Image (tube, rainbow, N blue to C red):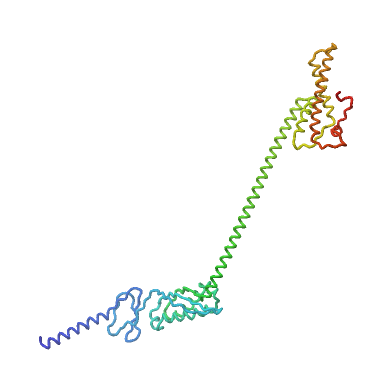
Amino acid sequence: MSPLDVILLIVAAVVVLWVVITLYRSVRIVPQQRQDVVERLGRYHRTLKPGMNLLMPFVDNVRAKVDMREAVVSFPPQPVITSDNLVVSIDTVLYFRVIDSVRATYEIANALQAIEQLTVTTLRNVIGSMDLEKALTSRDEINQHLSSVLDETTGRWGIKVTRVEIKAIEPPPSIRDSMEKQMRAERDRRAAILTAEGVKQSQILTADGDRQGAILRAQGDREARILQAEGQAKAIQTVFNAVHAANPDSKVLAYQYLQALPQIAAGAANKVWIVPAEFTKALDGIGGALGNLMKESGGPTTTEPVVEANQEVIDQALAEARAVAKETEDEAVRGLPASPQITARELLGDERRPEQEPA
């Protein structure tokens, strides 16, 4: 190969390389959610949109590639002094996005550092006007204040601060220990209050249950007594009606009274019981009743022997009745205290004449 051919080959290679470089610099493909700022001869010319764009080679130059998506930046903990002279460390998280790529490129040199410093200074101003307790409980207020200040300042930079969050507020270790003790005491107080309220409610429910139980028992006792009284009243009414329907005479009643005397004295707790003054009259009535009964059963009394026989029977019946009365009287007097001044006859009120006593 001659030297002329070598020179021609080199020139052709240089031309091809220049064409390739020219084509490469003339075509620019921009991805979605990104904008490229183009300068021509050192001056802003235009902004490339997503897709394929043509440039003038060796004249147009891409100054910056700006990401239009929302970005998240976490700043390191910053020491801040509260109004009660306590140093706390605050971590912040910032959300922002570029809304104007030209101003974000030409209005600020380092937008991220500027936002960080602005956040720190604003945070110190806000926290400095609060005490520790308010700072711990007012995160929403702090976030809103930071967002408004940052959005107003970064607006001229073509940046929109969408949200600012306080990630952590760390007080000093001694303050944390005091807060833990305070919270522990508060929890103990609440637990004691809840326990006391539970005991109080339990006692109230128990007392209410006892009261209702006593009321129900009293109502049941009252109804039982009412039913028992009604039953006794009906029984007495039935006996009363039966007695009046039978129309007994005084002799039958006197005999029933005589039969009831041993039952009155039979009680172990009966120390004193009273024998009425009409006791002798009752015996006379019984004797008369027995005499009439013997007369009715003995037939006619026209002969003297029959009259004598009936008189003996009557005397025997009267003697037996007086003996029964005497035994009843002795049983009644046996439970009374002995007294030398009062006799049994005076205590019982017996007014019988000496001639009526049996021989």
Left or right of residue 57, residue 210 in this image: right
> Picture coordinates of residue 347 (x, y %)?
85, 34
Q: Quadrant of the N terminus?
A: bottom left
How many numbered marks does the figure carry?
0
> Picture coordinates of residue 180 (x, y %)?
53, 70
Q: Is residue 86 above or below residue 330?
A: below
Q: Is residue 316 above or below residue 211?
A: above
Most distant residue in the top direction: 303
Q: Quadrant of the C terminus?
A: top right
Name the foreground residue: 184 vs 17.
Answer: 184
Left or right of residue 253, residue 115 in this image: left
Q: Is residue 351 above or below residue 75?
A: above
Left or right of residue 150, residue 251 in this image: right
Name the foreground residue: 36 vs 326.
Answer: 326
Quadrant hosting residue 221: top right
Quadrant hosting residue 315: top right
> Picture coordinates of residue 110 (x, y %)?
40, 82
Name the foreground residue: 334 vs 206.
Answer: 334
Left or right of residue 265, residue 174 in this image: left
Q: Residue at x 38, y 79 (%)?
A: 101
> Picture coordinates of residue 111 (x, y %)?
41, 81
Q: Is residue 228 above or below residue 141?
A: above
Most distant residue in the left direction: 1
Name the foreground residue: 347 vs 43.
Answer: 347
Most distant residue in the bottom direction: 3
